[in-house]
Amino acid sequence: MKQCYTCGGSRVTKRTGGFSFEPPKNLSLKENDVWVVPSAEWFECEDCGAQYIPYALSRTLEDMADVRRRHLATLPTDKEN
């Protein structure tokens, strides 16, 4: 990736390491919930901070969301209390 699609900047860097992600509210168990993928690769614009997620990382986040959805489905709802 040579250019940022958001700002047009040319300082897009490949990052590796722990990728932090705030899940959507409907998948959060608490305020300020953060998911971390410990070994990930993605691209980040050094000018505007835009992050570009490759397919493999996207699939990992989707898999994490599926696990959370299944977990939330097992919890009692307010109507059951």
Image (cartoon, helix red, strand yellow):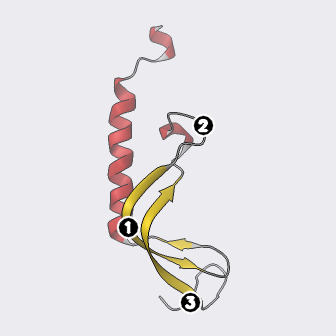
In-image side of 42 versus 5 (left or right): left
Q: CA distance from mark 1 to mark 2?
A: 24 Å
Please tell me whether mark 3 or mark 2 is closer to you in this view. Answer: 2
Amino acid type at mark 1: Ala
Please tell me whether mark 3 or mark 1 is closer to you in this view. Answer: 1
Q: Quadrant of residue 68?
A: top left
In-image side of 11 versus 18 (left or right): right
Instruction: Say which element carries label 2.
Output: loop
Instruction: Say which element carries label 3.
Output: loop
Q: Quadrant of residue 11?
A: bottom right
Q: CA distance from mark 3 to mark 2?
A: 35 Å
Q: Residue shown at 50%/34% (left/top)?
A: 29
Q: Find disc 2 in the rendering and name its residue.
A: 31
Q: Find disc 1 in the rendering and name its residue.
A: 40
Instruction: Say which element carries label 1.
Output: strand
Amino acid type at mark 3: Gln
Residue 59, image x, y percentages: 33, 60
Would you call the spot at circle 2 few (<14 residues within 10 Å), some (14-19), or many (20 or more)? Answer: few
Q: Residue shown at 48%/7% (left/top)?
A: 81
Residue 15, image x, y percentages: 46, 76
Would you call the spot at circle 3 few (<14 residues within 10 Å), some (14-19), or many (20 or more)? Answer: few
